[in-house]
Image: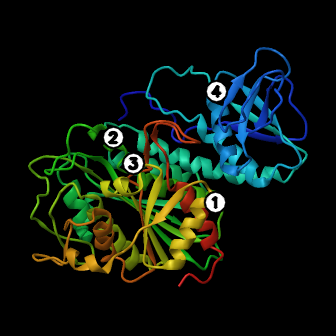
Amino acid sequence: MARFPLPSVPSRLIEVEVAGSPRRGAEVAVLVPAGAGEPVAGVPHSGKPGEVRRLPGGDVHWLVGIGEGEPAQWRTAGAALAREAADVKAVQVELGGDVTGDQVAELTLGALLGGYRFKVTADSGRPALRTLRLVTPEGGHQRIVDRVRALAEASALARDLANTPSNIKNPEWLADTAARLAAEVPGLTATVRDEQWLAAQGFGGILAVGGGSASPPRLIELTYRPRGAVRHLLLVGKGITFDTGGLSIKPADGMHLMRTDMAGGGAVIAAARAIASLRLPVRVTALVPAAENHVSGSSYRPGDVVRHYGGRTTEVANTDAEGRMVLADALAYGIRRFTPDAVIDVATLTGAMKVALGLRTGGLFATDDKLADGIREAGASVGEAWWRMPLLDAHADAVRGELADVKQAPGGPGGITAALFLREFTEGLPWAHLDIAGPARAEKPYAEVVPGATGFAARTLVAFAESFGTDQAVR
């Protein structure tokens, strides 16, 4: 039970209105391109993306830089305005006839997410921008805003779930919250599997990882089956609600951030909810194996051999490589039980990805070029960057086991060998592994991102499902 007043989950985002005329009482913001030259409302402004100035009095209240007009710069502008105008109720921006749909989408996305805040506090009186009004004669922009809102809500929900502190967010809480959220969306159903069911069905990986905690594991299963859908997409997200590292315990520095170690699972839950809300023409099954990796006399050990769902065995080398253990069970179960057309898993899996790609780009491994290209294009369309990494067969033998079928953490290039381990459980299906260890968290704001959990990957999954549902030629 929550002992502190949690923010609402999902967070409430600002309203974005599209209208043909200004609204009385709403403060006016003017978008300033780079190199505008002349002062705006008598005030000089560089037009740099995200530069916001508040003007005292007059008809114009805010100046907002949009740079050279690239859509991503409009996202930065929208986010900066939402942060700077947090103490007013409504702001309106007049859009000219030359403003593109992409620019409107990015401005809206930035405004919706840029002012996001998650804080466990008794103080509910914090001022916040409530409404952004886009004044434009182009009525078609409303459809764009509606779609972007669904994407932003997915990112915000993924942030909410990852930001929730782990003294509240155990596997049961995450499962119950996912079930509550699913019940709010027509066509989306949730099934929660408890530890007894997991034991009866042979989910050795999830049970091993969760065995050291007083909070037993869960498997969250979300199902969306729209009438007429011919494609079936399986999404699997790592749901480690807190990760001490187990007996291979982590250093104290940074361990507090491990409340976000279920960011992949949060992205999958949020994406499934958005896909159903948008009524996309694709069948989706979403699985989140949820466990807490803790230290006790019942923790699993280095040197153990674990039998996963379906029978394949794993030789444990490092109990802090727990994400691949729970994902292996969920992948094997999802593929055998549902026979999907394609599989995507998402996880904060390896520190190696942070070293390789930094904190703003996700690592993408895939067995299928078309699937990989589709994910990269989907990410680019919603402002999330992915870099394809190699599944090097030269390292495939490293994951072959001596005491068991496979080795869990054989060393070598960590991100690659982790992906190769997971590939052993994908049965040759088109499969992609998204390692978001870097971009799942942020220490400082940039564009629409704020410190804390970022919600990274949720928008990509929705955008990919949108195209996957209408594309008949993945294989």
Mark toward the start of the polypeptide (4 vs 3) = 4
- State the residue position of label 2: 257
- State the residue position of label 1: 381
Tell me where residue 386 appears, x and y as whole percent. Answer: 50, 61
Image quadrant assignment for residue 277: bottom right
Q: Secondary structure at mark 4?
A: helix
Mark toward the start of the polypeptide (1 vs 4) = 4
How many angstroms separate mark 4 from mark 3 (CA)? 33 Å
Q: Which amino acid does the dot numbered 2 rest on?
A: Leu
Q: Is 115 located above or below residue 351 in the figure? A: above
Which residue is located at x 55 percent, y 60 percent? Answer: 460
Residue 174 circle label: 3
Which mark lies nearer to you, 2 or 4?
4
Which residue is located at x 45 percent, y 24 percent? Answer: 121
Foreground residue, 377 or 302? 377
Tell me where residue 135 appears, x and y as whole percent. Answer: 85, 39
Q: Which amino acid does the dot numbered 3 rest on?
A: Leu
Tell me where residue 12 appears, x and y as whole percent. Answer: 60, 37
Q: Which amino acid does the dot numbered 4 rest on?
A: Glu
Foreground residue, 243 or 111? 111
Which residue is located at x 62 percent, y 76 percent? Answer: 229
Q: Secondary structure at mark 3?
A: helix
